[in-house]
Amino acid sequence: MAKLTDFMISKVRVKMLELFFKNPGELYYVRQITRLIDEEINAVRRELDRMNQTGILSSEKRGNRLYYYLNKKYDFYSELLRLVAKSSGLGKAIKKKRKDIGNPKFVMFSSKFAQKRLRGRDEVDILLVGNIKLQQLEPLVKAEEKIRGHEINFTVMTVEEFDFRKARRDPFVNEILSGGRIMIIGDEDALVEKNPEV
């Protein structure tokens, strides 16, 4: 299974990226990061300096502490968010248990879900298309709900139902496809492509 360490040599940087991108709205100070990722303070300081210089992170002084946070204007912010969503948390769990949960053709997280932003009452966090075994999927979702502290709104459809509803321009499916998304499993172009009338 693909991991962030496939692309990055520094395991400290990988841990820091996971920490920041799993909690995109949070601010952290050096000793807090050191505790959370369980790494040496000098290695954390080195990576913070590099990530701050390259623009991945920004910093601000509050009282006697320097806090670091994600720079959402960084050129590769979206790409890094996608990498972290796929290689950690619920994305990693779904990919790891792919065969156990059935045969998913597509698994898509909404951008709001990946960024831990509040969604509208009727918005979908996760779309799964394929033959999905709910009894295998639900424990993974419940574990993530416990971490996040709120319910996750997910929708499961067979490939046939999804294709039919997409071809008929079903408002519910159109709403899901019109929002920002991160593909965990499957090809984004295939997910959104127009199909002939069913």
Image: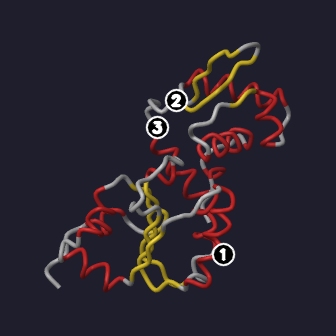
Say which residue label 1 marks: 139
Callout 3: 10 Å neighbours few (<14), some, many (20+)?
few
The answer to whether residue 187 is above or below residue 167 is above
- Residue drawn at x 60%, y 47% is 7
Question: Number of numbered discs present?
Answer: 3
Q: Amino acid at mark 2?
A: Asn
What quarter of the picture does the N terminus occupy? bottom right
Say which residue label 3 marks: 76
- Residue drawn at x 58%, y 24% is 58
User: Does label 2 or label 3 sit earlier along the sequence?
Assistant: 2
Q: CA distance from mark 3 to mark 1?
A: 32 Å
Label 3 element class: loop
**Which mark, residue 48?**
none
Q: Amino acid at mark 3?
A: Phe
Q: State the image quarter where residue 96 is shown.
A: bottom right
Q: Amino acid at mark 1?
A: Pro
- Residue 53 rendering spot, x and y as whole percentages: 59, 21
Nearer to the camera, 16 or 6: 16
Say which residue label 2 marks: 71
Q: Horizontally, is 197 left or right of 44 in the view? A: left
